[in-house]
Each structure stands twice: as structure tokens, then as C-alpha cells.
Amino acid sequence: MNFETKIESGLQCVIRLIHRPSVQELDRDLFFKELQNTDIVEIQYSNSSGVAVLLTKLIAKCLLPSSCNGLNMHVILVNTENQFQVSQLVRVMRVEACDVLGPTDVGDMVKNILNNLRIINCYNHHQVLLTLNSLDDLLLQNKKVGLVVIDSASAYFWQNKTDLSYNSYLAKILTIIEKKISYFKVLTLYTKQFNFISKKQTREWLEIQKLVRYELSLDVNEKNLICTSRSGKNEKQISYVVDNLGIMRLVEKTNNKSSDT
């Protein structure tokens, strides 16, 4: 028998004992391999490609109670783009709740749910770093947090572009995320614009690929929002239609493809 002694700090013990809400049912179409609480997801987008619509859909799913097919968890949004609309989140949650419960007044329920969303507005690079480095305190205080969203990780790169390449800058951000968020068994979604994507496979680029479990790329055609989900060598493409209320509805999904084929 193996009687090897394992030593852990008091903080490690507390983290290990914290039970976080599961994210496995967040979206099985987008996340075709089983999503884990420690995963990091990258969302690549261009202007008017629907990133706000997708983020709103995923945040609503997390916040809604299980009686409305939600995950009943708390969410932290690190808001650097300052484009997230709470009014649209309310609209989406109302529609999603009524789809399950039928035509009923869900106003009070949705209003109470908003207490489970914490938005931290950041207006420069230093505020982003300070916020990310303090998230471990917030996560220790609230064991119901299951998702942290950073919209976007590329917002203030230009403030440091003389010192770091974009890959170096992003690798620095992701290292903090891994230590301060993933370590606490919390899913992280972060966004970045397509014009910051580098094709050079530098050491920093390889570090990023090791940390990111899923890459979601957003595009639009004449009618639909197209999302390509990649994980490792596999990818899947999903089409959505966005109605006049800004609600995403699934139209079509392809089978998983491997880059080896």
C-alpha cells in the first residue's frame, strides 16, 4: 500500500473543500467535449460579429435557476469594453424563463437574479491587472461563483505595446487567470478581437495554446451568426439566427471534424 504523505497549505485545503456549481451543461453544442470548471475559453470576434449576444446568452444560462434550465450560479464580469448591456441580459432571461415556465410574470425573479451578477468596470491596463490579482479574494468569499468573464483581454494592450508583443501580453494575462481563477475551480471566458490574432507560433503562442481548452470564433453571414468551436484537433461549426430581441436560436450544427482529416 502507498502511505505517501501529502502536505498542503491551509488555503489549498479550503479551495479543495469548496464545492462549485458545475458548468458541464452550459452549452453542449458549443462545448462538445465535457466542459470542466477549471477550463479557459477564448472567444475571437470582429466588430458586429455577435460577441455581446453570445456572452449574454451564456451569462443568462449561468444565472437562471435550475427550474428555468439554468445553472443557478453566480457570475463575475470583468468589463473592459464597457459595452455589456444589463437591459439585454434581463430581456434574454425573461424570454428563456418564459420558454420554460410559460406566459407568467418573471420580473421579480429576474430582478433578484441580477444580484448574483457582479460587474467590475476597468478603464485601463493597471485596473485590469489589479482586478485579476484580487479575484482570489472574491472567489474565496463566494463559493457560488462558477463563471468569470473577461470582456475583453485585448482592450488595453495598446497601453503596453511598446513593452510586450500581443502574445506576451495575453500570456501574462492567462498566467494570472490560471493562478487566480482556474485554481479555484471556476470557468473562465475571455474575448479578444481578430485583429490581435498572431499567426506566428512563438513560445508565448504555444503557452497560450496549452492553457486554452476551447477557441470560439465568431462570424456573420447575411442571415446567421456562425460560431466555430475548436478544442485540440477537433472543431464544430454552429449556425444561429438572432431575432429582433437579440435572442440566439440554434439553426444548424455540423458534426465534429478533426484537423487530421
Image (tube, rainbow, N blue to C red):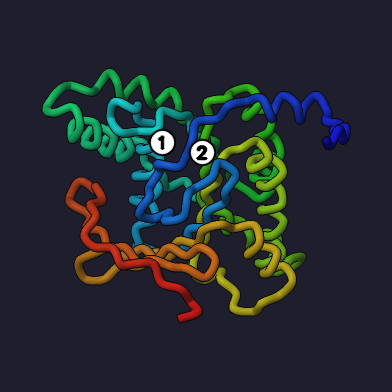
- Quick one: label 1, few (<14), some, or many (20+) residues within 10 Å? many
Q: Is residue 45 visible?
A: no
Q: Is 240 on the left-hand or right-hand side of 161?
A: left
Q: Nearer the viewer, residue 42 or 70?
A: 70
Q: Position of residue 105 (x, y in %)?
A: 17, 21
- Quick one: label 2, few (<14), some, or many (20+) residues within 10 Å? many
- For image coordinates 63% across by 48% down, the residue present is 124
Q: Nearer the viewer, residue 100 or 105?
A: 100
Quarter that holds the C terminus: bottom left
Above or below: residue 193 compared with residue 61: below
Q: Amino acid at mark 1?
A: Cys
SS for dot 1: helix
Q: Is 239 on the left-hand or right-hand side of 7?
A: left
- For image coordinates 65% across by 35% down, the residue present is 184
Q: Position of residue 119 (x, y in %)?
A: 50, 34
Q: Amino acid at mark 2?
A: Leu
Q: Is residue 202 visible?
A: yes
- For image coordinates 86% across by 32% down, the residue present is 3
Residue 62 is labelled as 1
Residue 147 is labelled as 2
The reply to whether discs 1 and 2 touch (Cβ–Cβ < 8 Å) is yes
Calculate the distance from the C-alpha at mark 1 to the C-alpha at mark 2: 8 Å
Q: Position of residue 45 (x, y in %)?
A: 44, 63
Which residue occupies the extreme left position in the image?
103
On the image, which quarter does residue 57 sit in? top left
Residue 75 is labelled as none
- For image coordinates 36% across by 37% down, the residue present is 60
Q: Is 48 on the left-hand or right-hand side of 240?
A: right
Above or below: residue 2 compared with residue 155: above
SS for dot 2: strand
Q: Nearer the viewer, residue 245 or 64?
A: 64
